[in-house]
Image (cartoon, coloured by chain):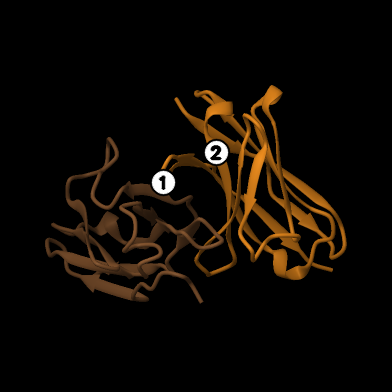
Chain colours: A orange, B brown
Amino acid sequence: EVQLVQSGAEVKKPGESLKISCKGSGYSFTSYWIGWVRQMPGKGLEWMGIIYPGDSDTRYSPSFQGQVTISADKSISTAYLQWSSLKASDTAMYYCVRLESTHFDYWGQGTLVTVSS
Amino acid sequence: QSALTQPASVSGSPGQSITISCTGTSSDVGGYNYVSWYQQHPGKAPKLMIYEVSNRPSGVSNRFSGSKSGNTASLTISGLQAEDEADYYCSSYTSSSTPWVFGGGTKLTVL
């Protein structure tokens, strides 16, 4: 069974750093792109970026380029989304997704990030 | 502003059919048969309902169907049930600088 299991909810202060994770199982982790999707409170889905764990090729949405870093450790089948300096506007639910060529077929359960002073 | 345009809300009575539209451009919806639809219940992760315009993943009810004409894709739900009440998002591959885009989402209310 394919599963994407994300790390737990985080509460951080503005300016702090954060790295959240997404562990894939039940499939060949290095053969599928893994993406990240943001959902701000009460809002819609926003595509942030995507990584191919096989060779770490990474693409970012222009809206998120320079704001976050996407990485992966194929040895432990885990993808990451990190911030070096969080802002209150980063408060959102973040989902990791598996890209099956043309669509996102599996979604993680989501990681809620709350940034507040 | 989302790259793909969806109505903010639609509603229907149990047993009826509804259609949700998703309008883009020739650079996304109109240019590729890579439109997908996702259902999201409150507090839950989105779930894939339709891919490549009209294909249903295994386990998705055949009450859900998709189509496309020009730059507009559509999701039709027939025989509405209370459990269909949710938010629905379309997505498309795009030739722009961000290869995947979502619609703004449509809230479906089953009356």
Q: Secondary structure at mark 1?
A: strand
Name the residue tied to disc 1: A103
Kind of residue at disc 2: Trp
Q: Secondary structure at mark 2?
A: strand
Counting every numbered tag in the picture gives: 2
Q: Nearer the viewer, residue A20 or A72?
A: A72
Residue B76 on image: x %, y %: 20, 60
Q: Name the subunit of mark 2.
A: A
Q: Is residue A90 left or right of residue A105?
A: right
Residue B35 in the image: above or below residue A55:
below
Characterize the local packing of mark 1: few (<14), some (14-19) or many (20 or more) Cα atoms within 10 angstroms. many
Question: Would you say B43 lies left or right of B80 here?
Answer: right
Q: Residue at x 47, y 29 (%)?
A: A2
Above or below A74: residue B99? below
Residue drawn 51% across and 63% down?
B96
Q: Which mark is residue A35?
A: none
**Is A25 or B101 nearer to us in this picture?**
B101
The residue pinned by badge 2 equals A33
* Quarter of the view holding residue B41: bottom left
Q: To which chain does the residue with label 1 belong? A: A
Give how far apart the Cα atoms at labels 1 and 2 are: 11 Å
Pinpoint residue B95: horizontal percent, then vertical percent: 46, 59
A3 vs B110: above or below: above
- Residue at the image position 42 percent from the left and 66 percent from the top: B103
Quadrant (top left/top right/bottom left/bottom right) for the C terminus of chain B = bottom left
Tell me the amino acid under the disc marked 1.
His
Residue A38 placement (x, y as % from top left): 59, 58
